[in-house]
Image (tube, rainbow, N blue to C red):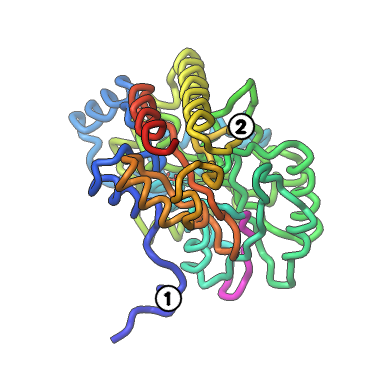
Amino acid sequence: MQTSQRLQLFRESVIRDMTRLALEHNAINLSQGFPDFDTPAPVKEAAVHAIQNGLNQYAITWGYPPLREKLAELYSQRLGWEVHPDKHVTITCGVSEGIITAVQSILNPGDELLILEPAHDNFRPAAYIANAVPVAVPLEAPDYRLEISKLQAAITPKTKAMLLNTPHNPTGRVFDDEEIAGVIDLVLENDLVLITDEIYDRILYDGRIHQSPGSLEPLKERTITIGGLGKTFAMTGWRLGYVIAPERFAQGIRTLHDFTTICAATPLQAAAVAALAMPDSFFEQMTHDYHQRRSLMMQILTEAGFQARSPQGAYYIMADYSQLPIPQASLPPTEFAYFMASDVGVAVVPGDSFYSLAGYGRSTIRFAFPKKLATLEEAGERLLARLR
Ligand SMILES: Cc1ncc(COP(=O)(O)O)c(C=O)c1O
């Protein structure tokens, strides 16, 4: 009795492994990307209210109607086409399910999916689950710029789609107009579908404004836009994501979603309407708080002797540890991450785990900083005490 061949192709998530390691060593968990501060009170109250008022059965499979209506309103503005709640919006159990169903809805066995690496560790499995082939194209440290010539070189007659995450985990890049213009040409010239993961659309620095690639005229008809609520509203455990797609894609995505999870949790979908209706002041405060966290984390890392670039979006920093004045500075990333959790008391993710490409991510670890300032300060004390 054997498990399926596709399971030979990927293993359990390294990121979630690191969270377990953090618990084992009582380390401060700067590995997995989730906040240690709580969901906004009005959103929690809306969930309790929904549960107490009978919203406890299956929702319509593709989403609780008021949530789809709210998203249709928001995304009609953002994408510049009329997003219809009944035709174009599907609520999923997290962005992860959105990506898996989008990829499955587009790719046939053997088709190729372009993925920029470093990449979130759910991306390659999404291709494998569809019996498709992930094709990795590197972003080179320390700038992590998207190089169109490298993407072009990876195209074959089997290339069907590209998966693009911006703002980007783990590099903190927000791809600029020039890079996105290159993606437009590539997608059009090769008749590809663009699948975007925009889960960090609200976490941006230095006045940046998020532009969904699917809002750009040539991409409107061929982009599947995926977003989620977990990161923005500090509720990663609620498992809420959504897919906005032109009708020809939305139909298949709904069918796959229906037979995978039936629906996302109904009372939490109801509370998500309250989350999306939070006032501007909430988002302004959040942006302010993330700037503080970013600057504290950069200050700590620089002082501790890491080499790192300040992120443009999202809440991660890729840091090079090769210049630290300790013998462990020559360890490979996984061993270094174990040393960090067990001896320093700060859990991180090995940088090479974001690559399938050999030789990348060397001497690099990822720090996640969606944490209270006090948590980051304590992590800073441990780093400064043990690494210098
Ligand atoms: C880029 C990216 N996409 C998707 C996910 C997973 O999102 P969700 O928790 O909504 O499934 C994450 C989580 O860290 C992520 O960083």
Marker disc for residue 312: 2
**In the foreground, 248 or 120:** 120
Residue sitting farthest toward the bottom: 1
Q: Which residues are magenta?
A: 108-116
Residue 99 in view: no
Q: Residues within 10 Å of mark 1 (few under 14, many from 20)?
A: few
Q: Position of residue 226 (x, y in %)?
A: 54, 45
Ligand 1 has an atom within 8 Å of the beta carbon of the residue at disc 2: no
Q: Residue at x 32, y 31 (%)?
A: 36
Marker disc for residue 8: 1
**In the foreground, 216 or 255:** 216
Q: Residue at x 55, y 63 (%)?
A: 356
Left or right of residue 343: residue 125: right
Marker disc for residue 71: none
Residue type highlighted by circle 1: Gln
Q: Quadrant of residue 274?
A: top left
User: In the image, is residue 111 part of the stretch drawn in magenta?
Assistant: yes
Q: Position of residue 317 (x, y in %)?
A: 52, 38
Q: Residue at x 48, y 20 (%)?
A: 292
